[in-house]
Amino acid sequence: MNALGDRFAPEFVWGVATSSYQIEGATTEDGRGPSIWDVFAARPGRTHRGHDGAVAVDHYHRWRQDVALIDQLGLDAYRFSIAWPRIQPEGAGAVEPRGLAFYDRLVDGLLEVGIEPWPTLFHWDLPQALEDAGGWPRRETAERFADYAEIVVDALGDRVRHWTTLNEPWCAAFLGYGSGVHAPGRTEPAAALAASHHLHLAHGLALERIRARRPDVEVGVTLNLYAVSPADDTGRHDDAVRRIDGLMNRWFLDPILLGRYPQDVLDDVAGVGGTDVIGDEDLTVIGAPVDFLGVNYYTRHVVAAGPWPGSAEVEFVSRDWPKTASGWDIDPEGLGEVLARVRRDYPPVPIYITENGAAFDDVLGVDGRVRDDDRIDFLRRHLTVLADAIEDGVDVRGYFAWSLLDNFEWAEGYRKRFGIVYVDFETLERTPKDSAHWFGALARQTAKERR
């Protein structure tokens, strides 16, 4: 038996996570409208080798097989996202019943084998029609999201107990509208800030609608959080740490958990524009208490001040540490720091680790086995830190490994494998990796009283 498993309570939730555009495929079937990722990926040079999610790993047709994999691993929960363009092809107005029917079947299929569905309403695949109208920098997009949330919850809320409004709004706002490396590929700093606010507002408005329709369910939001450290202990880099922590962590934690934006970050971005969209009553809506906070953790940021005194630049420093295939430092201790910080600086809130995982250069052996010991070590080390945090009093109630399947990894296309299940991208055959067997055994040990 694994001693690590003994450190988690029987009620601890063990699951895996995916997202719609990364796995579903079938982008033109059953009335689905185009998303910003369909359009972005079709532009030359935007994704690795022009890869797109048109087929992805064909979860839309193979979902029963994928549910069976989760069941075979003995996991409690499946975190997936719902594709807005399947539900409302134009992002507003008419509902596509075939899109709702797909998720209806998926939810029923999960429940039939005792797996709890954990849907996320938005994991970056905004309907292109809404982007054509201005996208997340426009307030109307937040209002349309609330309408969409109500439609989905009306359809599935009698069976789904846990709802996540947004996944990683930082990425949607700043990678999509700031750096342009994600869809829709815009490089407009003011638009990125406006988008971040309207994503917050979308969360708050959806929370209101869901609670009005289904007061018996739990609603939360998922943020990607980072430990942020200075390049050295001279003190010269402390303001760089403050600024990066402000934009990456506090800009999202503070409005949702405290009902306000951090003043120092407002001061930092005063000359950029985009914050004039913040309405007088918005933060009351945004800051309504959540039932849980989802935390996605992958790595730490180490930062340094710019090359001359008073410089506003910040440099991200690469350390001589073991790295994943994505080039990210493997730093489990950062997860503990993130969790301790949420506990210390914010009101009490139940936490779920909604994503944690790593890409490695996995190879399917001639014997049909994928020996991904590096991923097992990654998961074990992070879960050990998580167990320490729980013992220190952090209220963490579950862990979702990213990801169930190798899939379309956004701008990286199909060259990064995050799955605990190997996918042959030519045949789409699924093969559980050694990490899947390890993770499933750990989950079954901990939850042996329930499954």
Image (tube, helix red, strand yellow):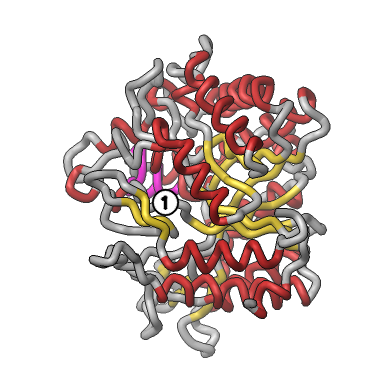
Q: Relative to 156, does residue 355 appear above or below in the rendering?
A: below
Left or right of residue 51, residue 447 in this image? right
**Which of 137 and 308 lies nearest the eye of the viewer?**
137
Amino acid at dot 1: Leu
Kindly identify the residue that appears in the image at 66 percent across and 33 percent down: 279
Residue 273, image x and y in percent?
49, 43
Q: Is residue 232 magenta?
A: no
* Residue numbers of the magenta segment: 173-184
Residue 77, image x and y in percent?
63, 48
Residue that badge 1 annotates: 405
Quadrant including the C terminus: bottom right
**Which of 294 and 263 lies nearest the eye of the viewer?**
294
**Residue farthest to the bottom, as pictured:** 234
Name the quadrant containing residue 329: bottom left
Residue 341, image x and y in percent?
69, 69
Residue 216, image x and y in percent?
82, 33
Q: Relative to 209, does residue 97 appear above or below in the rendering?
A: above
The number of numbered discs placed on residues in the rendered structure image is: 1
Instruction: Say few, some or many: other residues with alpha carbon within 10 Å of mark 1 (under 14 / 14 to 19 / 20 or more).
Output: many
Kindly identify the residue that appears in the image at 22 percent across and 50 percent down: 48
Q: Relative to 348, does residue 41 appear above or below in the rendering?
A: above
